[in-house]
Amino acid sequence: MSDSPGVAVFDTNVLVSGFLNPHGAPGRIVDWLRSGAVRAGLDDRIISEYEDVLLRPELELPRHEVSIVLKRIQSQAAFAVVSPAHVVRGLPDPDDAPFAECSLALECPLVSGNTRHFPAAAIGKLTVLTPRQFVDAGEKG
């Protein structure tokens, strides 16, 4: 993945898991985001959620590391322009819609630890991968 950065939309749970367990697949993704080996697809809604969740005191994540990763994500991001054609309805949690909408707008995969939150009936042809699937694909490519 280091030759040409891939783009994917990362559900917030992937980043939280990556900081909590740096040795698993989500941790590898956080490392790739920090190094620029992959780029996050996002919009202002996702950036706001990342900042809100990752800086919650109860998570006790390393604030300095979180700040570094957030700055790197924003500086390397593929920013989505979500149009009415990309609006997603029918998700179990409507707060997940920005992630699916950005993935559709950017035509890139969505990576989530909760793939069941994105049923095919609501997202159509959108590719949703677990962190392990994304890492395995990246290591093969």
Image: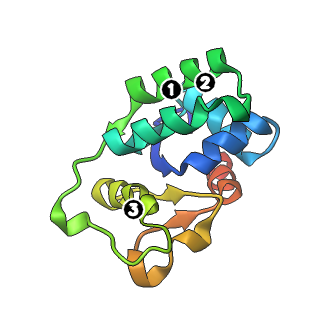
Q: Count of labels shown?
A: 3
Q: Residues within 10 Å of mark 1 (few under 14, many from 20)?
A: some
Q: Earlier in the sequence, mark 3 or mark 1?
A: 1
Q: Can you identify the residue that label 3 sits on?
A: 97
Residue drawn at 59 percent across, 58 percent down: 112
Where the N terminus falls, by quadrant? top right
Q: Residues within 10 Å of mark 3 (few under 14, many from 20)?
A: many
Separation (CA) of disc 3 from disc 2: 24 Å
Residue drawn at 66 percent across, 41 percent down: 16
Q: Earlier in the sequence, mark 3 or mark 2?
A: 2
**Which label belongs to residue 66?**
2
- The picture places residue 118, in percent across and down from the top left corner, at 50, 71
Q: Residues within 10 Å of mark 2 (few under 14, many from 20)?
A: many
Of residues 32 and 122, the one nearer the viewer is: 122
Image marks 3 and 2: residues in contact by CB distance under 8 Å: no
The answer to whether residue 110 is above or below residue 59 is below
Of residues 17 and 128, the one nearer the viewer is: 17
- The picture places residue 36, in percent across and down from the top left corner, at 52, 27
For badge 2, the amino acid type reads Val
Residue 94 lies left or right of residue 141; in this view the side is left
**Which label belongs to residue 70?**
1
Residue drawn at 62 percent across, 54 percent down: 134
Residue drawn at 22 percent across, 48 percent down: 81
The answer to whether residue 59 is above or below residue 96 is above
